[in-house]
Image (cartoon, rainbow, N blue to C red):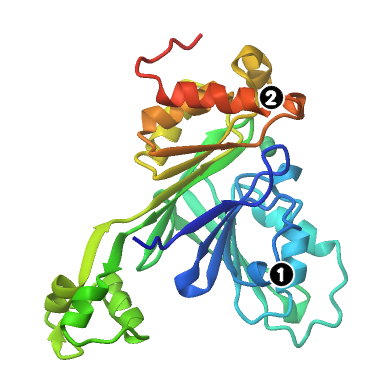
Amino acid sequence: MKPLLHPALINGPFEDPGLCVEIKWERRAILFDLGDNAVLEPAKLLKVSDVFVSHTHMDHFVGFDHLLRIVLGREKALRVYGPPGITDSVEGKLRGYTWNLTEEYPLILQVTEVSADRIKRAEFYAKDGFKRRDTDTLPFSGILLEEDMFTIHACHFDHKIPSLGFALKERFHININKDKLAALNLQVGPWLREFKEALWEGRPEGEYFKEFPLGVLRDRIATVTEGQKISYIVDAVYNADNEEKIVGLAKDSDIMYCEAAYLDKDRDIASERYHLTARQAGELARKAGAKELVILHFSPRYKDDPDALYKEAMEAFTSLSLPSQR
Ligand SMILES: [Zn+2]
Ligand SMILES: [Zn+2]
């Protein structure tokens, strides 16, 4: 089955954290975190529509400038989502440059600041030197973005400051069966895209598509299955409240990306620094019922032995009995 969402870590585990999820179907990409992203080709950065920032510690936000530089001349808006203070952080970045020759630039930056119960939105237009316009305030119910194809959920974790975790969920997956298509004398073509879009939009089953009612065509050529779920959890301390929130957000993920900054033997340091250990990452992924765990954001102290982190996380992820947490 061809997946809709193609996630890939931007950097190695000792470098800045960040995940790029490509939606090839829409020639679009979504970024989680804005650490150093210089390795991403400009063609890929140009496809970025939405960026979800966990928090603005430098290793999660230093890549803002590079992304802005690449997308500055483009028409499509760039949406940035982040924790309380993100609008000031974006504004501060923008104020660091001079914008007197951008009157012709159509770019709009839309910033969504997420607190526990509300979201505040602001816009910055390149054409007027990125002057801040606070637009509206809405209640926050846990969902940051809801489209026909997918939704993005967010949750605040304690990292001594609020740090956001994210889960991207494809609403359902549509797979086209080529043999069944041929049996109906139908050719592969751009109409299949419209057909899938009609299903995602939830158009009436009786509405005609080609010479069939939509629901009939769906049953004859398509298999509709559970959508993919990808979760991205970084910088959070291990405590009961974070555990409950992380397990809830990452529930049944196909892939859970999770920080594993320290080894369990250094869990006191992890706790002081408000980070997770590899073992905690493994246990959280197991409790969430994730199908796959990918760990990232390692402390440089393990440069010589990253395998120890992978081994510890995988042991906790796959072990049958729950090891006791000190
Ligand atoms: Zn941090
Ligand atoms: Zn970090």
Q: Which residue is mark 2?
A: 273
Q: Nearer the viewer, residue 108 or 304?
A: 304
Residue 87 is situated, as x and y percent measured from the top left of the image, at 66, 57
Q: Which residue is mark 1?
A: 42
Residue 148 is situated, as x and y percent measured from the top left of the image, at 35, 68
Where residue 296 is drawn, which disc sits there? none
* Quadrant position of residue 126: bottom right
Q: Is residue 238 visible?
A: no
In this rendering, is residue 40 above or below 310?
Answer: below
Residue type highlighted by circle 1:
Pro
* Quadrant position of residue 221: bottom left
Q: Residue at x 76, y 25 (%)?
A: 304
Q: Is residue 151 visible?
A: yes
In this rendering, is residue 191 above or below 150?
Answer: below
Q: Is mark 1 within 8 Å of ligand 2?
A: no
Spatial CA distance of label 1 from label 2 is: 34 Å
